[in-house]
Amino acid sequence: MSLPQRDISPLAGQLEQTLSAGRLPSEVSGWGSQLLQRLRQPVQVAVAGSPGSGKSALIDMLLGRVVIGRNGGGLLVDVCHGAQEMAEVETAAGERLQIPGLLAQMELPQDACRVRQILPDPRLRWHSYRELPLAGPLAAQQEMLQQAAASADIILWCSQEFAADEQGLWAAVPDSTKDHSFLVLTMADRQVMRGTLPALIETLEPVAAEEFLGVYPVAAIQGLTARAAEAPQDGLWRSSGGKQLAEDVQRQVDLGRASDVDQAELLIRQFGSTLPAEAAAPAVAAPVTAPVSAIAAAPQAASLAVALEQLQTGAEAMLAEADAAGGPQAAPVLAQCMEMIRNLSQSLDEMPASAAVEAAREAAQDGEEMLMLCQLEQDEDAAVDAVTLLIQLKKELMEEPPG
């Protein structure tokens, strides 16, 4: 079961209890409140772009059905979970209407400006969609995009060619948001027919490497056709580009929620009473140490087990030291994190070569590179990210141990 599908209500309840009881020091109470808010709401995926860039079609493709259709033009549209299929429509005059059914099948008031489409789709419990129309004066577009960057967890930028004016608009988005954003080249089938797609991707790749997680050419209509078909259309789903985008977006959703869960568990373990049973299961399991017979047969595995356990205990110790010092000290925490991940890499280097060991080495190397980026910032957020990274790495290696 992926993390977003796991019931994290007990964990959120325990964190709320810890906050309400005043157990968190003032230095971290704001962080705890933000974590609680994120745990109790879906990951928001904003789909932004100019009019006609294919935003509605992309959301429909990801949902696997025509929900917005052609009725989303110029509107701010939220697609979220609810018990009944209906749309809440807000007009420029301030009127609020509730209309049963799907937005794509409705006749909206002429002054409609915002729609909240509710669907009983269980996937929307874990992440919602927001269609963000960028039109009008440049200042208005900039303000709307900055608001989206502040509230959205992931942004999909829809464009047919990501021209210079779009690049200028995107440049003002904070780097922390760019790290969780995708450039989606919509209507890619047209580019394929013209024979211009490879050259366009080659032109945009240097820009996208700095500004996005990657470039994703997508033919949304074909992708929707594949997903809505009664018989499986895996080949069309894959060739449309939709499959890769959907999987990578889901991966970002999983990583974001995993980070929130890890940080909440750390706070509760350090300052709360006890973790709820489901969340506490990994934490209260027997320490990750090899039995005597295994140590004798495979000292490398024992060395790895010790290194993994050090990641967990070291992270908890850093939280305790930060509390005793009156607040997190970024530099010492980041230095300790780097030392621990290098110890892990050394343990992996001593293990006999195998595909699993090589994958674990690559994961540790990626983690070390991310820690180096954290060290550049040298602030409390960077220290928290570093500790969370170590805990997540330990969990991944425990689930698929090398050797």
Image: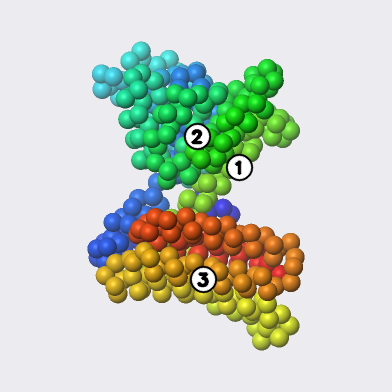
Residue holding disc 1 = 247
In this rendering, position of residue 384 left or right of residue 241: left
42, above or below 328, in the image: above
Residue type at mark 1 is Glu
Q: CA distance from mark 2 to mark 3?
A: 35 Å
Is label 3 or label 1 in front? Answer: 3
Residue 113 place in picture, x, y as percent = 34, 21
Residue 51 place in picture, x, y as percent = 46, 19
Q: Residue at x 47, y 25 (%)?
A: 164
Judged from the image, the secondary structure of the residue bearing numbered disc 1 is helix
Residue 235 place in picture, x, y as percent = 74, 33
Q: Residue at x 53, y 35 (%)?
A: 207
Q: Rate crowding at label 1 as few (under 14), some (14 to 19) or many (20 or more) other CA atoms within 10 Å.
A: few
Q: How is the image coloured?
A: rainbow
Judged from the image, the secondary structure of the residue bearing numbered disc 3 is helix
Q: Is residue 225 visible?
A: no
Q: CA distance from mark 3 to mark 1?
A: 31 Å
Is label 2 or label 3 in front? Answer: 3
Q: Rate crowding at label 3 as few (under 14), some (14 to 19) or many (20 or more) other CA atoms within 10 Å.
A: many
Judged from the image, the secondary structure of the residue bearing numbered disc 2 is strand
Report the residue that reaches farthest toward the top.
110
Q: Residue at x 40, y 67 (%)?
A: 333
Residue 313 place in picture, x, y as percent = 47, 74
Q: Earlier in the sequence, mark 3 or mark 1?
A: 1
Label number found at residue 374: none
Residue holding disc 2 = 156
